[in-house]
Image (cartoon, coloured by chain):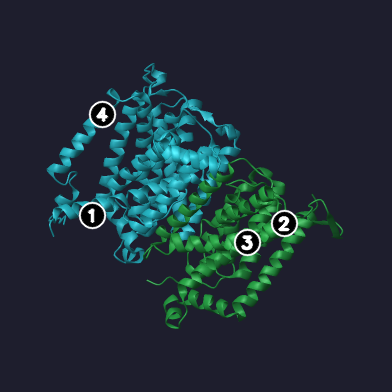
Chain colours: A cyan, B green
Amino acid sequence: MDMKRDYYEDIRLFESGVVLFWTVALLLVLFTVPLYTPNYYVYLLNMILVHVILAVGLNILVGSTGQISLGHAGFFAIGAYGTALLMAKLQIPFVFAILAAAFIAAFFGFILGLPALRLEGPYLAIVSLGFGLTIMHIIGGVEAFGGRMGIKVPPLDLGIPQLGMAWVLKTDVQKYYLILVMTIVMVVGARNILKTRVGRSFVAIRDSDIAAEVIGVNLTVYKTLAFAVSAFYAGIAGGLFGFVLGFFDPFTFNLILSIIFLVMVVVGGLGTIVGGILGATLITYLQYALLKNIAEVPYLGEFLTALSKRWFTVVGLENFSGIAIGLIMIGIIIFEPLGMYGIWIRIKKYWRTWPF
Amino acid sequence: MPFGQLLVEGLAIGACYGLFATAVVIIYKTSEVVNFAQGEMAMFSTFVAFHILTIYEYPFWLAFILSMVFAILLGVLIEFLFLRPAKHPSILGLIVITLGAEMFLMGLAGWKWGAEQKFFSLPLNASVTYEPVKGMIVNQWAIAVFAVTAAIMLFLFLFFKYSKLGVAMRATQQNKHAAKIMGIRTERVFSFAWGFSSLIGAVAGMFFASRATLDPAYMMEPFMRAFAAAVLGGLMSIPGVIIGGGLLGLIENFFGYYFPHWKPIVAFIVIILVLCLRPSGLFARHYVKKV
């Protein structure tokens, strides 16, 4: 139903006035949200925005290029540790530190992309999974990286301390504006990448890598590039994530986190920018707000507490988030493989063509 | 530690990896699903055995039989409830479903039994040792692993070669549609493969649990190693997987003796190297992708 009639229609940022209107409205809400919400929700919003950056980047790899990665927690860790250590140990200003960390992550993404040239499907999943766990073990094993005890991030100074220009962001609200601006830049960047020659090559590789090679897409370049771009996004997200948390250890970046990242993309919708944003928002909200405090949810919480007392253990109720997310993962593949974006398309189609 | 000791220990843990990898391979062979929930299925069955042993205080053999029955039911149920309803899932879809089953089982076990570590012991005494050759000390745990692995291998060999069901499973693996036309109920074969694999996984899971501790996440690392063993063997042949498991156990044990700090990442390096250099495994025939 969305027919593209010329190239400029395909590449423009907003498909129609309606989309422009709602995007501006959403941005207005996002920029004013800290004015009327309590501090805790600003922390949650920071978490959500960081995961939006990551999910949009992972979606370039999984959704648009069709490569599977279960190792994105590794890139996330490289971003977080890289930024924090470059700032704390070498006194590099924040902007350069986070970019450097993201480029280190991108380099590791390129390295992981090399085996991907020969592997696909479950084999690639296993290699990336092993990669993520190896990064976790290496960080945990080297004392210079803080070892198993973890590290504390330095103050978030946007200025250049060497020149005496300090601009330290202390509160969650100040960090929120920084993360929001970076999220918007990264999301628009991802959307533009997908509309260029590079993005079309990615999609061609996803649809059929042999056909793509035949029509002249250089598989070596574009597959590794997809990994590098995706890892770059994960690095930026990781760098910001460190400042949201304030303190982290290697076990923050475990296998479960990689699985959660993949779930965000699959639940949101593969291969679309909106899908990444929706999935990251929903899953992060479930992870850090709803399921974490499931016992305080009216009715359901009481029911689950009673159930825990009778059949399970009350201390184990915190594991309920694993059960819920596991069921969401299975349910989305069985009932709606296109994810939330697919549901949205279906609703839109229904109303557009109503009453037929 | 002397050389002989490292050799025996490595082979014993390698046999354990091989046994567990066999469970992965049985599912992959029949339905081409890499079951990421394999470790958690074994974990859950071991927890059931633990529960029967500590709460009801039944003798070990009864708890063992009951938990094996449970393991078969669990495998069949997961196939029936989670995989069968998915219509033509992509490879990513299958991976997400099994990962979802993994998260689900881990959450359920954590809710039921809590996250703290528990001790699960087989009726074996690891301190009773034998020394058949000078310098090679074998404990009862290792002997039990070797015996059980050998028995299961022999059984699998006879099963796939001579039994009707085994032949049906091989036929389904070769061509699902042709098998269906020949009158094989392929859905039932899948259910059976899952139940069977869950059972073998649960046996291996009990060996792992009695070697370390029992908690909802204890099978994650053994699963990775078993998968490395399966990849070494080519993910398709059961004897290859056992040899792969032995090799991995030896590599890990010798490497871990000299560099104890980096022992956890040996398996990943093996996986990455094998997949990059010889993606079809050390023993499988070369595989050509159809366009």
Residue at 69 percent across and 59 percent down: it is B62
* Label at residue B60: 2
**Residue A297 visible in rendering:** yes
Q: CA distance from mark 1 to mark 4?
A: 30 Å
Q: Quadrant of residue A76?
A: top left
Is disc 2 on the same chain as disc 1?
no
**10 Å crowding of disc 1: few (<14), some (14-19), many (20+):** few
Q: Element type at marker 4? A: helix
Q: Position of residue B68 (x, y in %)?
A: 62, 61
Residue reaching furthest to the bottom:
B182
Which chain is indicated by disc 4? Answer: A
Per the image, the residue denoted by label 4 is A31
Q: Amino acid at mark 2?
A: Phe
- Viewer-side label of 1, 4: 1
Per the image, the residue denoted by label 3 is B68
Which chain is indicated by disc 3? Answer: B
Per the image, the residue denoted by label 1 is A346
In the displayed structure, A95 sits above or below A118; it is above
Q: CA distance from mark 3 to mark 1?
A: 45 Å
Q: In which quadrant is the N terminus of chain A drawn?
A: bottom left
- Viewer-side label of 3, 4: 3
Q: Is residue B108 left or right of residue A41?
A: right
Q: Amino acid at mark 3?
A: Met
